[in-house]
Amino acid sequence: MTTTTALTFSERQTATLAAAGRSNTQIARLRHVSVSTVEQHLTATYRKLGCRRSGLAAALNDQETADA
């Protein structure tokens, strides 16, 4: 994995919550950030993993497998 595809800690936390079915508003409340910040983290995550929200759980799992 290259640096450009590595998720930041915040991106991974946000993506994990989104993959679990949380809404952007719920994620923002849980993480004590704005909804805009959540959207920015998810946009970066989708770009880095090459997926959309519906495929996020699988993409995160694939990345964790690659990291191991």
Image (cartoon, rainbow, N blue to C red):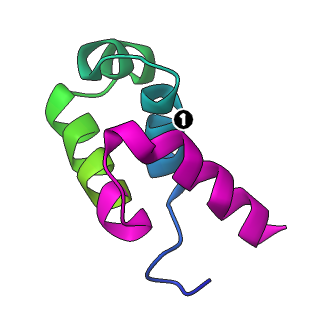
> Residue at the spot x=66%, y=50% of the render?
61
Start-end of magenta stretch: 46-68
In this rendered view, identify the residue nearer to me: 57 or 48: 57
Pointer 1 residue: 16
In this rendered view, identify the residue nearer to me: 34 or 20: 20
Quadrant into which the C terminus falls: bottom right
| Residue 5 position within the rendered picture, expressed as x and y whole percent measured from the top left | 47, 76
In this rendered view, identify the residue nearer to me: 25 or 53: 53
| Residue 46 position within the rendered picture, expressed as x and y whole percent measured from the top left | 33, 56
Residue 51 located left or right of residue 43: right
Where 65 sits versus 36, above or below?
A: below
Magenta span: predominant SS is helix
> Residue at the spot x=14%, y=35% of the render?
36
Outermost residue on the bottom side: it is: 2
Amino acid type, mark 1: Thr
Quadrant into which the N terminus falls: bottom right
